[in-house]
Image (tube, grey):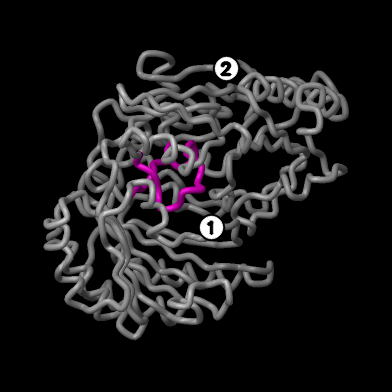
Amino acid sequence: MTVLTTADDAVARMRGVLGDRLLTPHDTGYDSARLPWNLVTDQRPFAVAIPRTDDEVAAVVREATASGLRIAPQATGHGAGPLRGTDLSRTVLIALREMREVVVDPVTRTATAQGGAVWHDVLTAAAPHGLTALHGSAGDVSVVGYTLHGGVSFYGRAHGLAVNSVRRVRLVAADGEIVTASADENPDLFWALRGGDAFGVVVSIEFELLPYPDVFAGLMLWDGSRAAEVSHAWAAWTASVPETVTTSLRVMHFPPLPELPPFICGRSVVTIDGALLETDAAAAEILEPLRALAPELDTFARIPAAELTAVHMDPPEPSPAVSEHAMLSSIDEALIDAFVGTAFDARPMISEIRHAGGAFARPTEGCGAISALDGDYLLTAISIAPVPEAVPGGIAAVQAVVDALQPWHGPGLALTFIDVPGHDLAPAFGDGAARVVELRRTHDPDGVFVAARALG
């Protein structure tokens, strides 16, 4: 990387592009602008740039790199956990939060979303056309970060990972040029972007939509005292459900906070939630073994597809959290006993197993660096760490859950569930890991881009 100007010159030049949307530690607004959604990561960049156009992104990249500064793109910061402890004092954080336009083409059944768009933006634009997307369980998550790192949806056992829906990516490369990657244009880069990271600042992404105006979905809830009974029943049930059914099992411990709904405030509960791409009658028949367990809350019903993001009860506001993850190659009674036992002994806020397999496990023709999940179930554990002193205990709790199920771990990983620094990401890429590293060195030889889940 050739340094042509000083850092002060870079600030002045970036301000020439962005005005007061370039914030340094000396500016009012810097402290709020630098915060990611996951508040555990105390990122303190050299500056925060808030562009509104592709050209502004390109200009910031050129001015920053001319002074030897690095670039960290970020839309929401849900996945900022791996940056915890990273020195960003010579890095410009490009916050894409004001680039959220979404354009839907109902004829081709595609959407094009700007780099800062979140799933609520897509669902709002798609719903009038009777369409939806392979979105995640939370509506305020970045479309780009979630999708390009795989994307595990409640539609996934029928339709696979969200990354396989991508048709085209536009990004600002390390030299400040705007590049398009697709099957026909820069195909090697397109392959790497579908799973790989640190190739540039993605300013827009085009992806396929699904023809579902509504979906049968919801949540069932029982008291935590029934966790073993419900968990064993769910595990046995998943062995026979069709690929049209994608659900998760969670054991959750909630503190007695007044802002929590009464049905979970101060309680330990076990829940099953998800979606069924079935008629009402077929869905009711499939759910009957679970309903026979008499849940105290059962919201499963036909709902508008745009409301599916509310089912999983993800936090609506930025939160400080730590988590750990593993793929599970199989599930049996001993695993469920271990899962429930450690969920109560270690007591992270959430211990969860998601049903994978089906289309999740099948690579797609013409796929990218990541196309499938190697494992039939996905394990994750999450702890809230409201103060820095709570982080070590939270880490120990989530690690205990994952360690307790180690005999059942599979070789794969789901990248969007990796939220710790220094995790070996290669298992998520299988045989493609070396090629991703090689292409990263080709496209960013000076290491301009700082990414939370970069391989190599």
Residue 12 x, y percent position in the rendering: 86, 25
In the rendered structure, the answer to whether residue 58 lies left or right of residue 144 reads right
Residue 233, by quadrant, is: bottom left
Query: Relative to the observer, which residue lies in front, 138 or 392?
Result: 138
Q: Which residue lies furthest to the front in this view?
A: 128
**Of the residues tagged 1 and 2, which is closer to the observer?**
1
Q: In which quarter of the image is residue 275?
A: bottom left
Question: Magenta residues, as a range?
Answer: 133-153
Q: Residue type at mark 2? A: Ile
Q: Mark 2 points at which residue?
A: 178
Residue 421 point in image, percent of width and height: 57, 53
Graded by Cα atoms within 10 Å as few (under 14), some (14 to 19) or many (20 or more), the crowding at tag 1 reads few
Mark drawn on residue 316:
1
Work out how far the residue at label 1 is from the one at label 2, CA to CA, in angstroms: 34 Å
Quadrant containing the N terminus in the rendered view: top right
Report whether residue 427 is seen. Answer: no
Please tell me which of labels 1 and 2 falls first in the chain.
Answer: 2
Compared with 14, 216 (above or below) is below
**Residue found at x 68% / y 24%:** 61
Q: Considering only vertical position in the picture, is 316 above or below 430?
A: below
Residue 32 in view of the camera: yes
Q: Provide the major secondary structure of the magenta segment.
A: loop
